[in-house]
Amino acid sequence: MGTLHNGCFDKSEMTNQTRFSLNALPFVVALFLLIAVPRIEHFLFPVVKDFVVTGMVKEPHAVVINGYMHKVRDCNFVGVQVVTVNDGIEVDAPLIFLDTQNNNATRPKGTQGWGPWQVVVKAEAADAIKLTSTHRCHPFWATDTVLATVPLREH
């Protein structure tokens, strides 16, 4: 282990393992931050809160939903991903915005209605649909917010 000489740390007495560990520490911390911060951000600072489905119509090859939400951060909209959930298995499903011609419009902050949105899926073929929005809030990474999991079957 190194010692202090005249207020300075003497590295010449450190073992190679200690020296390597101290040199690697900034890289380990940076890697942890790169992995952890984006995952923690959507829990602590979601873009959308109170996403509520107020209406659902099951059609032969689609489910049409609508409702309201509260956008709490001023971030640019990237898209909404929909997956069907069946026995724990998630499969991507197409989403059609029936309420707008501009599918990538960024909404202002505040409470607002959304929909109708059409999810192309046979309602009897899935237990639920899960909606996740993606926004660009800063240049470092995209921010995902799980909006809702909507059950399609009555239990």
Image (cartoon, helix red, strand yellow):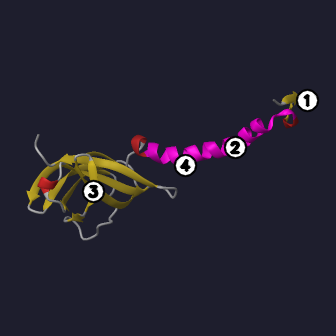
For marks 4 and 3, the one nearer the N-term is: 4
Q: Where does residue 133 sit, x and y in percent of width and height?
A: 33, 54
Rounded to the nearest angstrom, the CA distance separating label 1 from label 2 is: 26 Å
Number of numbered discs = 4
Foreground pick, 47 / 111? 47
Label 1 sits on residue: 6
* Principal secondary structure, stretch drawn in magenta: helix
Rounded to the nearest angstrom, the CA distance separating label 4 from label 3 is: 28 Å
**Quarter of the image containing the C terminus?**
top left
Label 4 sits on residue: 34
For marks 3 and 1, the one nearer the N-term is: 1
Foreground pick, 85 / 64? 85
Q: Where does residue 16 sit, x and y in percent of width and height?
A: 79, 39
Rounded to the nearest angstrom, the CA distance separating label 4 from label 2 is: 16 Å
- Residue 28 part of the magenta-drawn span: yes
Residue 24 circle label: 2
Identify the element where label 4 is drawn. helix
Q: Is residue 107 depicted above or below 86 in this figure?
A: below
Label 3 sits on residue: 91
Rounded to the nearest angstrom, the CA distance separating label 3 from label 1 is: 64 Å
- Mark 4 and mark 3 residues within 8 Å of each other at the beta carbon: no
